[in-house]
Image (cartoon, rainbow, N blue to C red):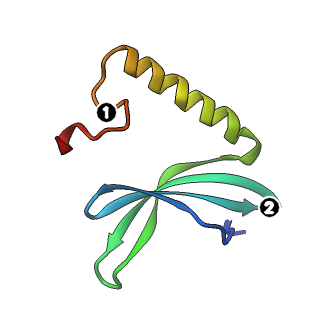
């Protein structure tokens, strides 16, 4: 049974000119998941397509994931890691 993507707005984070990370909601066997997946640009048809690289976590774990990401970023800020504040260090 294939995973079905729910038609809700997805969040896109550009990685490079030819790849991005797409965050979306999907359904598989009646269960809802938060899907975070790398996508590549297919030059043949001009669209982004998902790769096998990524994770799907049960939607009820989304809040825990969010708080965990914030904690890790706070620790990175405390260590002075460039970019942890959300500002691209290469854009300066």
Q: How many marks?
A: 2
Q: Is residue 25 above or below residue 62?
A: below
Task: Point out residue 11 in the picture as x, y percentages from the top left corner.
Answer: 52, 58
Task: Point out residue 50 in the picture as x, y percentages from the top left corner.
Answer: 47, 65
Quadrant where the N terminus lies?
bottom right
Measuring 28% from the left and 64% from the top, which residue is drawn there? 18
Q: Which residue is at the far right?
A: 30
Left or right of residue 9, residue 15 in this image: left
Circle 2 or circle 1, nearest the eye: 1
Measuring 33% from the left and 70% from the top, which residue is drawn there? 41
Residue where numbered disc 1 is placed: 83
Measuring 38% from the left and 21% from the top, which residue is drawn there? 77
Quadrant where the C terminus lies?
top left
Few, some or many residues within 10 Å of mark 1 (<14, 14–19, 20+): few
Question: For numbered disc 1, what is the local secondary structure?
Answer: loop
Q: Is residue 45 above or below residue 83?
A: below
**Residues at marks 2 and 1, CA–CA distance in whole angstroms:** 38 Å
Q: Is residue 38 above or below residue 5?
A: above
Task: Point out residue 31 in the picture as x, y percentages from the top left corner.
Answer: 80, 56
Residue where numbered disc 2 is placed: 29
| Nearer to the camera, 3 or 10 | 10
| Nearer to the camera, 11 or 38 | 11
| Nearer to the camera, 24 or 29 | 24
Q: Is residue 60 above or below residue 7?
A: above
Few, some or many residues within 10 Å of mark 2 (<14, 14–19, 20+): few
Task: Point out residue 71 in the picture as x, y percentages from the top left corner.
Answer: 54, 23
Question: For numbered disc 2, what is the local secondary structure?
Answer: loop
Residue 80 lies in what quarter of the image?
top left
């Amino acid at each position: 049974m294939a995973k079905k993507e729910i038609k809700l707005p997805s969040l896109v984070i550009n990685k490079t000119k030819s790849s991005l990370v797409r965050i979306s909601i999907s359904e598989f066997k009646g269960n809802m998941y938060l899907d975070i997946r790398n996508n590549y640009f297919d030059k043949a048809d001009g669209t982004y397509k998902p790769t096998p690289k990524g994770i799907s976590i049960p939607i009820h774990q989304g809040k825990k994931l969010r708080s965990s990401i914030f904690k890790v970023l706070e620790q990175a800020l405390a260590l002075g890691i460039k970019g942890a504040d959300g500002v691209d260090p290469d854009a300066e």
